[in-house]
Image (cartoon, coloured by chain):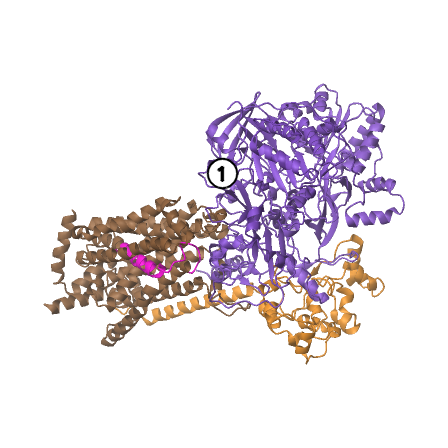
Chain colours: A brown, B orange, C purple
Amino acid sequence: MLEQLTTHARDAEQKNKRWSYASISDHIADIVLRKNFGWRWWLLLGISSAGTLIFFGAIAYLFSVGVGIWGIDIPVAWGFAIGNFVWWIGIGHAGTFISAVLLLLRQRWRTSINRFAEAMTLFAASIAGLFPILHLGRPWFFYWLLPYPDVMNVWPQWRSPLVWDFFAISTYITVSLLFWYVGLIPDLATLRDRAHGTRAQIIYGLFALGWRGDAIHWARFEQAYLLLAGLATPLVVSVHSIVSLDFAIGNTPGYHSTIFPPYFVAGALFSGFAMVLTLAIPLRHYFHLEQFITPVHLNNAAKVLLATGAIVTYGYASEIFMAFYSDDPYERYVAINRATGPYAPVYWTMLCCNVALPQLLWFKRVRHSIATLFAISLVINIGMWLERMMIVITSLHRDFLPSAWGMFWPTRWDWIIFFGSVALFVFLFLMFIRLLPAISIFEMRQLGHAAESSQ
Amino acid sequence: MPQVFSLRRVLLIKLGSLVLLIVVAATLVVMHWQMQYPNAVGAPVRQPIPFSHKHHVGDDGIDCRYCHTSVERGSSAGLPSTQICLSCHSQLFSDANIFNPLFSSMQSNRSVVWTRVHDLPDFVYFDHSIHVAKGVACVECHGRIDQMPLTWRVASLDMQWCLDCHRAPQPHLHAANEIFAMPPPAVSNGEQLSGFYHLRSRQRLTDCSTCHR
Amino acid sequence: MNISLDRRQFIKLIAATGAIAQTACSRPPPETILPYVHMPERMLPGAPEYYATAFVQHGYAIGVLIESNMGRPIKIEGNPHHPASRGATNTFAQASILQLWDPDRSRSVRRDGIVSTWSEWLSAISSISVEAQKNRGAGLRILTGNITSPTLLAQLQQLKIQFPNLHWHTYEPLHNDNASAGATLAFGKPLDVIYRIERANVIVTLDADFLSHGPAATIYAREFAARRRPDHAAGMNRVYALECSPGLLGTVADHRIPLSPAELERAAWQLAELIEGNTINDAPNWLQQIALDLNRHRGESLIIAGPRLPPSLHALAHSLNERLNNSQHTIQYIAPVVPPQNASLQELVSAMSDGGVDTLFILNNNAVYQAPAALEFSAALKHVRCSIHAGFYVDETARQCQWHVPLAHTYEQWSDARAYDGTATIVQPLIAPLYGGTSPHEILNRLLGNESRSAYDTVRAYWRSLRSENFDAFWQSVLQRGVIADSAFPSQTVVARPVEKSRALNDASLTAIFAADPAVDDGEYSNNGWLQELPRPLSAMTWDNAALMSVATARRYNVNNGDIVELQHNGRRLQTPVWIVPGHADRAITLPLGYGRWAAGNSGNGVGFNAYALRPVDSSWFIDGIQLRKLGTRYSFALTQTQTDSADRKPVLHATLTELRAQPEFVRIDTEKNSGAGSLYPEYSYDNYKWGMTIDLSACIGCNACTIACQAENNIPVVGKNEVARGRHMHWIRVDHYFEGSKEDESAQKNPTVLYQPVPCMHCERAPCEEVCPVGATMHDSEGLNVQVYNRCVGTRFCSNNCPYKVRRFNFLQYADRERESLKAQRNPEVTVRQRGVMEKCTYCLQRITRGRIEAEKRGTPLRDGEIVTACQAVCPTQAIAFGNLNDGDSAVARAQHSSRNYTLLEELNTKPRTTYLAKISNPNASISAQLSKPEPRDA
């Protein structure tokens, strides 16, 4: 089965060269414009929308009763909410990396995966953006983190990384949205022109902003797109660096560490690319996009996983090393406690998922076995989630004064809100592939064109 | 293929977006209104007895402290007890039936229920005595009470307003003997007075802990 | 389509939108002001006033000043003039204010469990009175607890004269009968003992925790702590605590020797021999050293026998103190403050079951619950024709009685009471009875036939009979001062006759020891949320009691914390969870009384297990030969502190006196590391005041009074067992305890050194919390306070994460009760009641500082040292807490911070706390090795 798939994909790769403008447009646009989308899609949509409803129900309950419904306490005042936030934000990064950085680096192969990667970024970032607000004791005052003139004559407290965070995240979401939308415009026009029903035509037409594909349109578009890519690129590094400062600024042993910014960014890309694979593999299989999303892509993604995984591993190692090298009793205790304390299982599972298993990717056979890749990507997603939790919780639960030590046990609401957010993500993604081209049509056309001319 | 965006459709779309804008604006206005103070600045507040400061202070020249007995000693200025009102009105105009609430209060030994004009949030701890002791005249917050037939609020009472004075109190200070005057003569020597009253540093006056606990 | 329909729809739509807008956010409602009709003289609206009265526990008075704000009593302070208080109080006195406002208090007269009316009750009691007049009180009996009230005693005397056949029984579950019996053995008459702890250089206690129990505990703690400070003029005292069940004293003593009751009795007799100078072969070294030490300090030593011990040992203690020439120096004898017991509960029960009781008055006593189950009081009660219960609550007894009459709370009625030394205090009401309610005086008046005589008249009449000349002046002065001058009982010179050796206790494989519970006492305070949530010493347990036992005992029965066991003693069974207390005597288990109630109220019902179920008929304190069986089921506790091992982090620095002498600066060794490290932020300057606090760990006895005083002062909510178990207790100042000695060290586990450390907010100069709050809700103020602005807090909880001391508390849910009016009335109006979702913490009692500052500003002179007293500082029985202005060089706190013992917690973090500690100093006997060798049990 796997062999078949790979071989199929391989000769699809050769075929790919003979694709014409029209056929590309047909193939991708038809996915969106086709009437019946198959029972599998409907089933998934049903499940995920149910989950989404539960998610919002849980949030309503949270707002009416308070964050006390979670397992957080003193000393562990931050729990799942913050962990989920960091995890989701991290997942976002791969999208920006692929679409912006690789664009600037002229990496052609990115073309077929950037669109849905960006969508993934947007959805992940938006969901991530929810959590810091959900986590507030008085969420209805979240806007007090904004500097705005008010009758109280008070401003945010600029020394607090949470304020920087607020800006980082909002910028990130805005830029991702713009980048994604601008990239969509030509394809929206294509869909407008190909749509059958007038309602579809109007809606696509509205969002196509009257794109007619003039030379001048294209010229402006190229500029804008490149500019946004330039804007988005630094965000790949900045956003998660600032998120990491939420911890690094604190004096809590296990938080207070200079390695955090690079370590977090690497972790972000790591989890992000894992998520890209988790989404790409079923997508290409289900919609027969093997010709567009080829083993080359998967292979490259796997290599990125390997690289970023190595950096993350270095992060773990350096944390432990510094703990003992610095001879700080509290840091040392945290290191030991993580490995042997009550949360040791979390720690070791995380190491298996993020350090041990990804090593399989050194083997070409593994990188080309679609199913294995899929499995590994899932494992890494779990591993990175565990890592976030490990950082947030195990550092807090035993800090300086033994008398204040405590434990964190997640309640059912912690779980509901986490899985709810996953459901929301799936829901959004399903709607995305239903309504918008999951692969950039115009860029594939260019690619095809380039391929032809290269002959 | 027919034109998708006919003029009619375009118009509809434009109108639709306009409506959307209006709704948003309306919501904001409603929210703003909702957050307003119960009684507006400058709006006379209805009371069980149409008490006139204009008459008592302006015309009769009764000192504030005759009724607001604890203004110099306590956090609350103190609202006059029925007894205090009746100390005059058992004789004066005692036949006017606007005083019925007063008499019934005395008979039933139940308070006259006045409506608050100046209402601070519960997390703000204001102390009249210290403001009076430091030379802040009544008029600074309560305005020309001697010209109010029915009492109303002259100040917004929001934090900004408090801070304006706490940051730079000098222009609002008055000589110790003019604090209850209506109106006290304009001050020129604010700096001198702040020295005289030993006002604490601007930092101290604007500490959170000065008003919030 | 017709238009009208459309319009209707349109209007509906508008209405709906309006409704939604309304619910979305609503304007603040217009408020009203209610001025007085008659303004009270000299009353200042909003300003607190203090009234002197007494808190009465087991009949004994502790003088208190009650803070009343706009007529609402809200806080208890000790009365500096009162001998049992001297300005301090215990945890129960602090919590009594909550009892006053308790919504579960009895609100109406009940007859046969059904709500009745006062008039019905009055007619009933007058008919009883008439009946009694006829048969001169035959079949009429009264059951009370301890009574020291001179007026009430006079009334009872009059009753006895009027009704010769009347019987008066008293029952106190935490009785002191053994002591008075012991005094009778030694002196031929019952006497009360007053210890002059401050004069004693060597103290030996025999199962006597005088810091926790007894009417003088507060004052003894003060005197004791005075001599624990190495800089005291007379030097440090040395304390040997021989104890059966771990108490506060043992944990702060220089030597704690855990012994089972039988072992302790043997040791006591051996000690007597050794003091006589005889040599005993099998006497352990430590005992011989104690004897030497005692003989070395004749006239300035003290031997104290605890209330649980048999009379013979009390007599022995008296004769030994006589022998050591201590009497009249470190110990004094006075006539008993509680007049010797008339008739016991047992006699009452037998009389009841014989049908010899027609009418029974139970005045403020809960015998149905508190009497030993073996006595079967409630069964006997059924034979009583007319039973009347008068009390605060519709409790277990009230439900069994024919009549229940609500009593006014002590703070709602006129009465009087005596302190441990006989000093009398007039109890005056601070507020009219919230739920009606009468007083024992009035009930007895009605019984005596003088119908309408009020408690006020009765009390005044009694004292007028004693002080007739210018009585009103006298009355005014005693009400103001809260003490009746020279009403203390005179000390008597008596000679203790020697006692012949006798063994009252026999060795058993397992002895059960009944104990007063540190939180609910004998069960009287079971419904008090503050006390229930107060961590019990040595376990940090809340909302529970447990069978306490030593590590070895637990190992012997193969049980662990939380295992439920069944205790059995001649036929009676009791199921209870186990809690292991390091330092508990082996072969003994402690059963705290006062739990497992079924009619206490919403807070107290069904909390813990009822140890009265096992208590023998004579209410004795020990039962030997008790069987323990492990059931295999488990129970989970709610602890406020789960880690008792300091993990080699030395939060509490301590040394012996000799070490201190050798190296006065020893604290620097540990703290020098990073001190003086700089900061990137500019320094603050304090032109005016600079507040600071110092806590003397040598003086702290871990009694938790500070915690509950803080709770009362600062409107700190009660969160309940589940929330505590989740680690969400709200106390602003917590008393940490550490067991010194590693888990491996066997002897350290057997009998570890216990270290206490109260931890309030440190008010750091470089506060980590301030830097991370995104909205500036926690700020540094110009007097150095680290202030928390509730109304600005959005609840990111970053500050708590960043606080190395973890003193910040978060309102995870809406903890402050918004429904029950009486609880609202109890709150301190000068402190904001916190909303759900905001962080809170110790403010150094900002409201008190502000009040003081404003007064000082008004009078134009700076604040004097000691003018501002924080709630924890005021209540502390040992005066361990100093607070004041660090800018003033001779303020108490500034002097303390210049002491060589002064150190800051986690100094290496460079947070520069304003709250510092004075290292704990102990004064052990060098010739006793650290690991005390216990006398080997014979049957082992």
Please indicate whether residue C846 sits to the left or right of residue C5 in the image.
right
Q: 10 Å neighbourhood of mark 1: few (<14), some, or many (≥20)?
A: some
Amino acid beneath label 1: Ala
Q: Is residue C129 above or below residue B98?
A: above
Residue A438 at what x, y percent from top left?
25, 59
Q: Which residue is mark 1?
A: C748
Residue B61 at what x, y percent from top left?
79, 72
Task: Give me the residue at 76% from left, 67% from top.
Answer: B65
Q: Which residues are magenta?
A: A249-276
Q: Is residue C100 magenta?
A: no
Badge 1 sits on which subunit? Answer: C
Which residue is at the far left?
A455
Which residue is at the far top?
C354
Q: Quadrant of residue C623?
A: top right
Q: Is residue A254 magenta?
A: yes
Residue A375 at what x, y percent from top left?
25, 48
Which residue is at the far bottom?
B188
Residue C20 at what x, y percent from top left?
51, 58
